Amino acid sequence: MIDLNVYNTLPPVKGRLLITEPFEDSEYFQRSVILLCEHNEEGTFGFVLNNYVDVQLSDFNEMPEFDTRLSLGGPVSSKNLYYIHTLGEQLEGSIAVTDELYAGGNFAALKEMISNHQVDRTQVRFFVGYSGWVQNQLEGEIKSNAWLVSDIPDYRMVMDVDNEQLWSQLMKRQGGKYKAFAHFPTNPALN
């Protein structure tokens, strides 16, 4: 196995990204980028940013029509709807993930804002399910070279539901050998 930890010196903390190594082939995490929304002594949770489902937002919880794509946030609670946003204190009960990004908040108020066209797809994005790790599990996976940890270069990358190249862009940004990994085929046998 390739030792990816040579360059992986950032610890996993709330507001950073996890980037899968290029040969990960699990159903949920192949070439995934995950926004860490919480990381503490009890565990970790976040959302896969670049895995989408062919479901409409209006299929959930009597949600109004909204022009966006839903992401498969991960394998945990995959029948529930979650969201991140840039609305901050405009949405009561929101939890800061970074200075620009927030998770959760008053769901009824968000539905009303969507109905009244007060938000657009650059301000809120939705996930079906989430990704979670128990205490120390993520650190173990990082040590076994399953993940790279990265800062967010620009919060708008996180909110962009149309970027099909997010994993490749972030791998290139890591520099060195990761630049080359960004161009590896999903199945190296097809190279």
Image: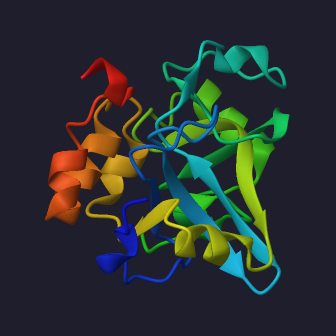
Colour convention of the picture:
rainbow
Q: Measuring 44% from the left and 33% from the top, which residue is drawn there?
A: 120
Given residues 172 and 89, the one toward you in this image is 172
Q: Quarter holding the N terminus? A: bottom left
Vertical arrangement, residue 154 with respect to residue 27, above or below: below
Vertical arrangement, residue 60 with respect to residue 72, above or below: above
| x, y percent for residue 43 | 77, 74
Q: Is residue 75 left or right of residue 29?
A: right
| x, y percent for residue 133 | 75, 64
Q: Is residue 167 left or right of residue 12?
A: left
Q: Is residue 15 visible?
A: yes
Vertical arrangement, residue 107 with respect to residue 137, above or below: above
Given residues 145 and 138, the one toward you in this image is 145
Q: Is residue 92 left or right of residue 156?
A: right
Given residues 190 and 9, the one toward you in this image is 190
Vertical arrangement, residue 57 with respect to residue 25, above or below: above
Q: Is residue 150 visible?
A: no
| x, y percent for residue 188 | 33, 30
Q: Quadrant of residue 89?
A: bottom right
Q: Quadrant of residue 2?
A: bottom left
| x, y percent for residue 130 | 72, 47
Figure disc tally: 0
Q: Quarter holding the C terminus? A: top left
Q: Measuring 39% from the left and 26% from the top, which residue is drawn there?
A: 187
Given residues 155 and 27, the one toward you in this image is 27
Q: Measuring 79% from the left and 22% from the top, which residue is drawn there?
A: 60
Q: Quadrant of residue 40?
A: bottom right
Q: Measuring 76% from the left and 14% from the top, which residue is drawn there?
A: 59
